[in-house]
Amino acid sequence: DAPLFDPGKEGTLDQALQAALSQRPDLLGKKKELDNRNIEVKYNENQIYPTLDLVSSLGLNGISGEAINITSGTVQGLSKFGGGYDKALSELTTGKYHLWQFGLNLSYPLGNRAAKSKLTSKRLEIAQLLLDIKDLERTITLEVREAYRQIKTDIKRVHAARIAREFAEEKLNAEEKKFEVGLSTSFNVLEFQEDLAEEQSNEIKATIDYKKSKNRLRQVKAQTLADNNIQLTEGDET
C-alpha cells in the first residue's frame, strides 16, 4: 500500500514557529539557566550593598531596693521601690514595668572586592546566556522554516507524481483496449505497463519523502514529545 498522504495537517508556518519556540527542550533549558543566573546576581548584589535594619526589643523589669527619703520642692517621702530580691521577682510578674528598646543597625561590607568580582562574573554569564538564547532562537527558526519549506516542496512532488501516475494508467488502459481489438502489440502494452510501474514508484517515493519531511518538522518543533503526552517546562532539563 502507498504511504499515507495527508497534506494540510502541518498547519501554518507561524504556528510551527510558535510551537517550536515554546516547546523545544534545549531552548527551555537555556531560559531556566538564565532564571537561575538572575537569582544569583540578585544574591551577589545584596552582598556588596550596605544594609540598614531596624531592631527592637520588649522586656519586663522587676524593681525593688532600699527605700530612701525623697525631697523635691514641697514633696517629701520614701521612694516606692522598697524591698529586696523577692520583691523584684514579684514586681516582674505583674508586668508593670516595661522596657522598650529601639535602634538601627547599619552594616557595610568591608573588603568586598571578591564579592564585586563575583557579581561581575555572574553578569557576564547572563550576557553570554542572552546571546546564546538569541542564537538558539535563530537556529530553531531556520530549522523550522527549512522543514516547513521542504514539506511544501514534497507536497508539490506528490501531486505531480500522482498526476503522472494517473496519466500512465490512462495510457495503459487505452493501449490495452487497442490490443484487444488488434490495433496494438503485446510489446507496446508491456512498455506502457513499465511506464506505469515507474510512475507508481515515483509517487510512492515522493510520498515517503513527504512523510520524512513531516516527521522532521515534528522533530524541530519537539512535537513528538507532545504526541506522547510528555510536557516540558522551563524547569525541566534534557
Image (cartoon, rainbow, N blue to C red):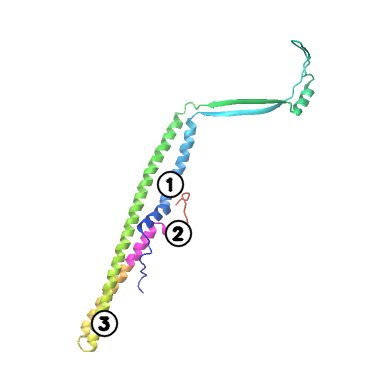
Residue for badge 3? 173
**Is 111 displayed left or right of 140 in the figure?**
right
Vertically, is 49 above or below 171? above
Q: In the image, what residue type sits under mark 1?
A: Lys
Labelled pair 1, 3 in contact (Cβ < 8 Å): no
Vertically, is 69 above or below 2? above
Residue segment shown in magenta: 208-229
Within 10 Å of the Cα at label 2, are there few (<14), some (14-19), or many (20+) other Cα atoms? few
Q: In the image, what residue type sits under mark 2?
A: Ala
Identify the secondary structure beneath mark 3.
Answer: helix
**Residue 121, how many percent across, how many down?**
41, 36
Within 10 Å of the Cα at label 3, are there few (<14), some (14-19), or many (20+) other Cα atoms? some
Q: Residue furthest bottom?
A: 181
Is residue 209 located in the magenta-colored stretch of the structure? Answer: yes
Q: Is residue 220 visible?
A: no
Mark 1 or mark 3: name the one nearer the start of the chain.
1
Q: Main secondary structure of the magenta part?
A: helix
Residue for badge 2? 226
Vertically, is 134 above or below 123? below
- From the viewer's side, name the closer residue of 64 and 15: 15
- From the viewer's side, name the closer residue of 77 and 59: 77
Q: Residue furthest front?
A: 74
**Is 125 displayed left or right of 59 in the figure?**
left
Q: Residue at x 33, y 67 (%)?
A: 208
Label 3 to label 2: alpha-carbon separation? 47 Å
Q: Residue at x 42, y 52 (%)?
A: 22
**Residue 210, how many percent across, how many down?**
33, 65
Identify the secondary structure beneath mark 1.
Answer: helix
Q: Residue at x 31, y 57 (%)?
A: 146
**Residue 92, how many percent across, how many down?**
75, 26
Where's the N terminus, which quadrant? bottom left
Residue for badge 1? 31
